[in-house]
Image (cartoon, rainbow, N blue to C red):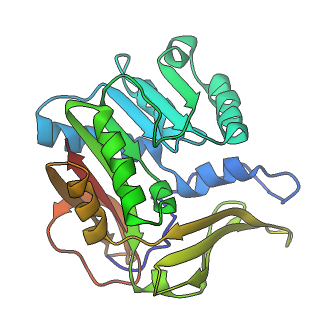
Amino acid sequence: MSNRTPAKRRGAKAARGWRTAAGSDRHELYEESVQSPEEEAAFIDRVFRSIRGRTPVTLREDFCGTHFLSATWVQRRATNRAVGFDLHRPTVAWGRARRAAAMKPAQLGRLDIRIGDVRTARSEPVDVLAAFNFSYYLFKRRQDLIAYFRHARTQLKRDGVMFVDCYGGYESFSEQTEERDLDGFTYQWQTERYDPVSGDVLNHIHFVFPDGTRLRKAFTYDWRLWTIPEIRECLAEAGFRGTHVYWEGTDHATGEGDGVFRKTAVGEACGGWIAYIAAEK
């Protein structure tokens, strides 16, 4: 796969008309430029069926934020249920208002969003636990990441599967700004600092508008840039009995990722990539 902006998902949604910084909401811009929950829900379904031979019903979304994935999950099937956890009350409140305006009462009744620390928060055992948008990268020490994975494992059913996403590529270690022009605004992903000794990375998302106004540092991420082998080793030490890597294919017409993730044992040494890991309890 060719170069890929780390936090950019497939098929960004079109903005509605002309945008300015003053008239834009950072959470809405994030959902439109970064997230593709419909594709992720379909991916979870497909992979879970291939591993377990049945259709998943219950999903837990850790670091759920505006809980876009959880909402999409319950809208996918009338039997689906979702629970989400996040510590940031304003973001969760924004998501609740957003979902309430777009979802039916019966769907909202199957969506349970809670304020809680994903390292300790407990819920009924679920088929799927998803930690997406690289949020678990905030655990910078190996022991802390393993402790989180160990707790996550306890929240799964006996045949449950945990899904995480990850990113990398040689450009991920470069202090630079990449951008994509979307409909009504430009999305920028900046790597302000990378420390090769600690693995710490400081990233920002900025939004730029046609009138020249900007939402600078709309989001900031102080992370450790974990690699796939490290993540798989931590999952194994946390007790997961098997992990599978799903690598994105290439759209040869554009040289960009095609949004199709296939199980693989070998990746590509490209500038930027996104992958998923499925971990079996």
Residue lying at 30% horizontally and 25% vertically, measured from the top left: 57
Lateral position of residue 61 relative to residue 159, left or right: right
- Between 76 and 165, the one lying in front of the other is 165
Q: Could you tell whether 224 is left or right of 210 in the image?
A: left
Q: Is residue 201 left or right of residue 90?
A: left
Image quadrant in which you'd find residue 187: bottom right
Count of numbered badges drawn on the protein: 0
Quadrant of the drawing holding the N terminus: bottom left
Please tell me which residue lies in front, 62 or 49: 62
Q: Position of residue 138 (x, y in %)?
A: 52, 60
Above-or-below relation of 78 to 5: above
Quarter of the rendering containing residue 76:
top left
Q: Position of residue 222 (x, y in %)?
A: 59, 68
Residue 44 on image: x %, y % = 30, 42
Residue 9 percent location from the top left of the image: 47, 59
Residue 100 higher or lower than 134, as above or below: above
What's the residue at 37%, 60% (across, down)? 143
Which of the 4 image quarters holds residue 244? bottom left
Taking depth in this image into account, of 5 and 11 the one nearest to the observer is 5
- Is residue 140 in sight in this rendering? yes
Quadrant in which the C terminus is drawn: top left
* Residue in the picture at 31% in, 26% down: 125
4, above or below 52, in the image? below
